[in-house]
Image (cartoon, helix red, strand yellow):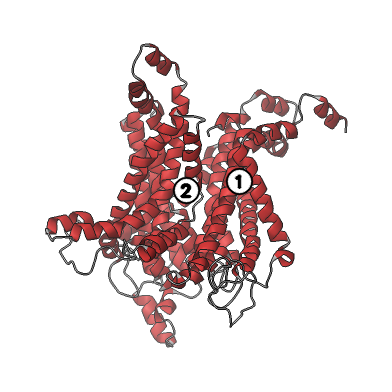
Amino acid sequence: MLRFIFGRLAVLIPTFIGVSIIAFSFIRLLPGDPVMLMSGERVMSPERHAELMHQLGLDRPIYVQYLDYLAGLVTGDFGSSIVTKRPVLEDFLNLFPATLELSLCAILVAVCLGIPAGVLAAVKRGTWLDQSIMGAALVGYSMPIFWWGLLLIIFFSGYLGWTPVSGRISLLYFFPSVTGFMLIDSLISGQAGAFKSALTYLILPTVVLATIPLAVIARQTRSAMLEVLGEDYVRTARAKGLSPLRVVGIHALRNAMIPVITTIGLQVGVLLAGAILTETIFSWPGIGKWMVDSVFKRDYAVVQGGLMLIAAVIMIVNLVVDLLYGLVNPRIRR
Amino acid sequence: MTVVETKASAPPSGLSEFWFYFSRNKGAVIGLVVFLAILLLAVFAPLVAPHSPSIQNRELLLLPPAWQEGGTWGHVLGTDAVGRDILSRLIYGARFSLFIGLVVVTLSVISGVLIGLVAGYFRGRVDTFIMRIMDIILAFPSLLLALVLVAVLGPGLLNAMIAISLVNQPHFVRLTRAAVMTEKSKDYVVGSQVAGAGTLRLMFLTILPNCLAPLIVQATLAFSAAILDAAALGFLGMGAQPPTPEWGTMLAEAREFIQRAWWVVTFPGLAILVTVLAINLMGDGLRDALDPKLKRS
């Protein structure tokens, strides 16, 4: 097992270095140099330009700059925003809980609905129930979620007036951020109605973000279940006279879960990509909206640092999933 | 010629066998029909569209669809905020979406297959190097990487297509590599190597044709994913630029009218959904027909 862990870590290091090279070189691919980007429309004398270049260390050889950048990364220095001058890491840590809360709720919804739906479809294979579940899953899988979000806003916020359109909680409530998770913080604050408000703000973005993972998980669960239900040990369990619920729920589902867990792990990238769109539609103050805003504000220091941090999050989650997978399924360790 | 004849006289030909399995999946046939209809609309857009996609009619701003009060049958799906006919814009928009899908799939398939073939055939250091690079690309959420790439290259349809191809390509590399690795050790490959076939012949004529099934299925999925990604980039303002009647861009323009005019928001998205759904239905059918091992739904 230890060898397996170190093997995975050894692969991670070159990937991390590669990601840092991409994030590093991306700013240098832009026309002009960072100083010119910072000065924007203002005219700058060549002397001042050279001085700033020197100040920022941009007149050094490119590999020295890169090593310097890498050293910064290792010590947690991801640069500072050109616009707000705040450290990128600080902004990231402030905004990440919002994205994490949304993503966790979305994956929770997707798992809690997707797995039962997939099991049901597999058990009732070929019936109208199977066909409607799989039809709905394919529609969900094909959904342009930015449009789906707008439709939900038109109907639930505009027509019915049930849910708010943007933000995380009503402006009526104010309390200190303890965990960064609005649902938990609002409970801690003890203010009447705060939790309900946070929930109404969360519900539509969660539905939108959960749509694609839900569809993928339902499809994957169904196919994994179908495979397992045909196995000999399931037939044996049935022949022993165990109740159908026990056969499906315990014997089959446990073994079908292995590929499903992998699929759930793979949804992290999907969730973060979906967060970009979902947060933009619902003005959700998370890292997805932060990245889009920074791209439009041409705040390339933030884009660079954000790319690096988001890639790091994905790599860590993938590593954890890999390790869990190795734990669950000894065959893969080799 | 003789080779073809012997093949045709053997049990059912490849094509009819394919159609036998494909047509058993009703969803796939529906998907194919819808896709062909959209394709025809796109090709004959100038003949089919009732109006020009770009002419603005200042007297008919935000006209509702024909069946609603105030709508006219001259503009079946209504008009947008500057008085352009929505139906015509959607029909012309089909051209962009299908074109984007085609270009992205072509670019990512060709580059992905070439790179994957090299990695799977030569293995060793070349393979490790290539796979590490693919890992790096896959470490970013695809839409974010595409968004940043387009920000670097400059917003626009062409750059959006390049960016989406790049983030799509690792899937083809991995798939080709895996298929090549399983095929390479099989007897028929060793046989033709012993018979003196050169490296290029082995790679492209002996091995590659036997790896095509999963690649075709993945290409269908990539086609629909490309349409979705391009629309998402257009929606974020980084894809096709207004006044191009690209569906995602139309949605972005329509966002501010969301409370007043539901139709400007609803129809472009519906067009994206129907197209992507049709292609995914076809993809499921293709998978059933081409790859019994992968048979799932």
- Residue A114 position (above or below residue B88): above
Q: Position of residue A8 (x, y in %)?
A: 37, 39
The residues bearing labels 2 and 1 have C-alpha atoms spaced at a distance of: 17 Å
Q: Secondary structure at mark 2?
A: helix
Q: Disc 1 marks which amino acid?
A: Thr
Within 10 Å of disc 1 (Cα), the crowding (few <14, some 14-19, many 20+) is many
Q: Position of residue A165 (x, y in %)?
A: 34, 65
Within 10 Å of disc 2 (Cα), the crowding (few <14, some 14-19, many 20+) is many
Furthest-top residue in this view = A240
Q: Disc 2 marks which amino acid?
A: Gly
Q: Is residue B136 visible?
A: yes
Label at residue A193: none
Label at residue B220: 1
Whether residue B184 sits left or right of residue B44 in the image: it is left
Label at residue A140: 2
Q: Position of residue B71 (x, y in %)?
A: 57, 71
Mark 2 or mark 1, whichever is nearer to me: 2
- Residue A87 position (above or below residue A100): below
Q: Is residue A66 visible?
A: no
